Structure formats: C-alpha cells, structure tokens
Amino acid sequence: MHINFIERKGHVLTRSTLKCLSQVASVNPALGCIHQCAYCYARGYSIYPGDGKVLVYGNMPEKLKQELSTRRRLPAYVFFSPTCDVLQPIPQVLWVTYNLMSALLEYGVGINLLTKGRIPSKFLELFSQYRKLVHVQIGITTVDRDIQKKMEPYAATPQERLLNIKRLCETGIVPEVKLDPLIPGVTDTESNVTALFKALQGFGVHSACMNYLFLRPQIKKNLCKALRNTPFLQKILGYYQSGMSLNLLAERSRVTALAVEYRKQAYGNISRWAKDFGVHAYVCGCKNPDITGEPLCGMNWGKHFEKGFGQKRLFEEGG
Ligand code: SF4
C-alpha cells in the first residue's frame, strides 16, 4: 500500500462531475480507496491512482478554512465524497477528513457522508455535537460475511456496519442505508434482504435507497477477477446477458444495466419486504432514470438540511 500526500491546487469545495451531484458542493480528500470493492466505479476513473495507492490532499484543511472565511455565501451542505470512502482506515485520510468536517460544521455547513468503513469514535463525538448538520448513509447490502468479503474485501464487515448504525442512532443521528449495488441472484434474494432488515430492526432506520449493479468494461473486469473462484460469477453475468444499455443521470456515460422488467419487479419486491420492517425503500433516481421519477439523490438527501439558501449560490457567486 502506497500512501502519499499531494497538494490540492484548486478550490476544496467543488461542483461534482457526477451529474446527480452537480448542484451540490462536494469534497474529495483523497484519490484511491483501500476498500477495493469489486464493483467500484471510481476504480475506472482516469484520476484513479491504481489499486494499492492512495493520494491524500494534505493541505486541504488549511485551504478549506481560507475558503470558508472569505466566501460571501456558504453552501448549506456538502457531499463527502464521489471518489473514495473518506473513512477508509488510513490515518492520513482520516486526519484530513476529520479536519475538513470539523471546519465545515463549525461554520454551520452540513455534511453528507456515505461510507462502507468503520466510523471512528472521534467522528461520532464530533457528529454528536452537530446532529442537525450531519446526514450519514451507510452502504450495506448483506449481513452475509462471506458474500460481503468477496465483494468488498477491505471494507468494514457487516457487523461493523451494523455497529456504526447502532452507534449513530445512539447519538441521535439516524442514518439512511444504501442497498447499492444490489447483485442480482446474490443480494436481492428474499432471504438476504429480510436478514438485513431484520438485523436493522430496532435501530430506528426508516429509509433505504436501492440500486442494482451496472457494468462497464472495467467494472466487469474487476468483478470477474474478484469472484473468479465463486459459484455466483457466471450466474451474475448471466443476468446481464439480457441487460440493456442505459444512460445514467449519475454520470455522463452509458452502462449495461439489468433489464427494465427485472429491475421493476425486484425493486417492488424489496420495497415490500422492507415495508414489513418499517423501512421505506426507494429506487435511486440517478441510476434508474428509465423506471422512476425519484429526484436525484443530492436533492433527496439534501432535504435533510433545512437552510434558507440554495446550493447553486456557491457556484453562481463564487468566492
Ligand atoms: S468504498 Fe466506495 S470508493 Fe471505496 S472501493 Fe468501495 S465503492 Fe469504491
């Protein structure tokens, strides 16, 4: 594993290149992610430094403080992070992330965090001081450690993620769960999904965002490598043989997605199973624009932050 500090030259708060987050300020403290999920789309980005390498913007906290103190208008909230998991277990990444988050929260700027990592106690203590400004999404699709380990070899275990959820709820922050990406025939089965919702029962989680795996050449290559000795690789690929080309709203690119009928039926099933456990499961609008009218995800979780000014102003009025 190679970890290197690099210098951030441009602004810290930027407009994401992901279309679904284009009106949301986002922060990317690092390039690269130690979790190495088999399905990771960021591993196909041109800025991805390669497996086993993480580049950390060490000067970001100082730059952010300058930006916050000189901007006339601040965003209501920011998104961490489209290019890596900001809670991956690398001290340098955690250090930069913590300092960025604490600076934003001190200025009253909300943060949305999506993670498959372990949330260190220090972060929970910080979040507990700013409950209304923190929205957390926990990526989890199974409580089966064997399946999870194949798909996300270095991410937190299902039990650790459940513990994250429990500890967040105890601090008064009820996270949303992200069933993303669901793997056809593997993690979308009734037994897998109900086991997951059963494990979540009692924590107070009431919202889940769903999306299926989509394929691109690089994702397919990584998936084949990660699952090469498993009985489910051919089964998974089989589902995509009857798949379709889809233009994602999340990114400006085409992908191979599961057939419309498959997704409609499966999302319907999962929603019903979730409802039995008191959870509202909805389809990610960014990645399923052909079958749902759900708003883009940035708008969806953005509702959590109630502020009197809009995100767009950050970009319209600049520094
Ligand atoms: S945690 Fe996210 S960014 Fe990291 S490897 Fe997995 S999918 Fe990619």
Image (cartoon, grey):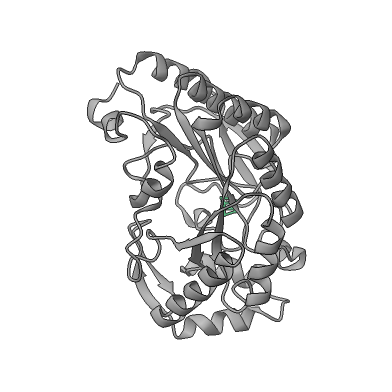
- Residue 201 placement: quadrant: bottom right
Q: Is residue 172 above or below residue 295?
A: above
Q: Is residue 65 above or below residue 204?
A: above
Residue located 72% across and 56% down the image:
158
Residue 86 shown left or right of residue 110 in the figure: right
Residue 111 shown left or right of residue 223 in the figure: left
Q: Is residue 112 above or below residue 212?
A: above
Q: Relative to the observer, which residue lies in front, 277 or 23?
A: 277
Can you give x and y, in whole percent of width and height, for residue 157 in the image?
Answer: 74, 54
- Can you say which quadrant of the picture contains the N terminus? top right
In this figure, what is the number of numbered marks? 0
Name the residue furthest left: 316
Can you give x and y, in whole percent of width and height, for residue 206 in the image?
Answer: 55, 53
Can you give x and y, in whole percent of width and height, for residue 211 in the image?
Answer: 49, 64
Can you give x and y, in whole percent of width and height, for residue 303 in the image?
Answer: 39, 42
Residue located 74% across and 66% down the image:
144
Q: Relative to the observer, which residue lies in front, 166 or 178?
A: 166
- Can you say which quadrant of the picture contains the C terminus? top left
Residue located 40% across and 14% down the image:
69
Residue 15 shown left or right of residue 54 in the figure: left
Q: Is residue 9 above or below residue 209?
A: above
